[in-house]
Image (cartoon, rainbow, N blue to C red):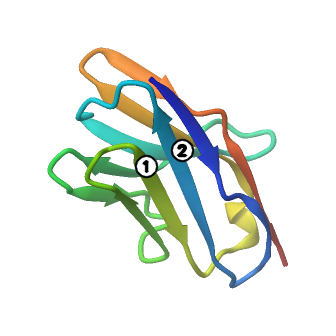
Amino acid sequence: VQLQASGGGLVQSGGSLRLSCAVSGRTPNFNDMSWYRQAPGKEREWVARIYGGGTTDYADSVKGRFTISRNRAWNTLYLQMTSLKPEDTAVYYCKAVRGMTTSWGQGTQVTVSS
């Protein structure tokens, strides 16, 4: 299984972006899929998660502004980001978990200017 994140870019504060994560290869029903981000000089942090049954969970810093979703086939994961802030600037990574196997995408850069 390979994950490919895309959709990043430069946006002004208050703007919106939609990230996508395409899953290639065998696409099993994952236990969950997540978005993480890593800002310069900081550790990678969890942003949002969607479970197999569709339940979602968000970091407090993005709750109410970001929405995670996926298609039914489990081969595309999305992150709709609104009301973006400069502190959302980071490389965003997608992750998929099935059993003991974790797969990561390569990351997509999001830059929010003030």
Q: Is residue 30 above or below residue 65?
A: above
Quarter-wise, where is residue 40 in the image? top right
Question: Which residue appears farthest toward the top when viewing the image?
Answer: 100
| Crowd around label 2: few <14 · some 14–19 · many ≥20 (10 Å) | some
Q: Is residue 41 left or right of residue 71?
A: right
Q: Is residue 16 left or right of residue 69?
A: right
Across and down, in percent, residue 72 comes to 26, 53
Q: Quadrant of residue 84?
A: bottom right
Q: Quick check: 15 above or below 88?
A: below
Hey, which quadrant is residue 11 in on the image? bottom right
Judged left or right of residue 2, residue 87 is: right
Q: Which residue is mark 1?
A: 76
Instruction: Please name the residue shown 40% across and 22% down the image.
Output: 102
Image quarter hosting the C terminus = bottom right
Which numbered mark, 2 or 1, is in the foreground of this view? 1
Residue 61 visible in the displayed image: no
Tell me: residue 101, above or below residue 31: above
* Residue ID for mark 2: 36
Q: Which of marks 1 and 2 precedes in the sequence?
A: 2
Residue 85, image x and y in percent? 69, 74
Query: Measuring 43% from the left and 57% from the top, which residue is drawn there?
Result: 59
The structure residue drawn at horizontal position 46% and vertical position 37%, both measured from the top left corner, is 23
Q: Amino acid at mark 2?
A: Tyr
Q: Quadrant of the N terminus?
A: top left
| As drawn, 110 above or below 29 | below
Q: Position of residue 81 (x, y in %)?
A: 56, 70
Element marked by disc 1: strand
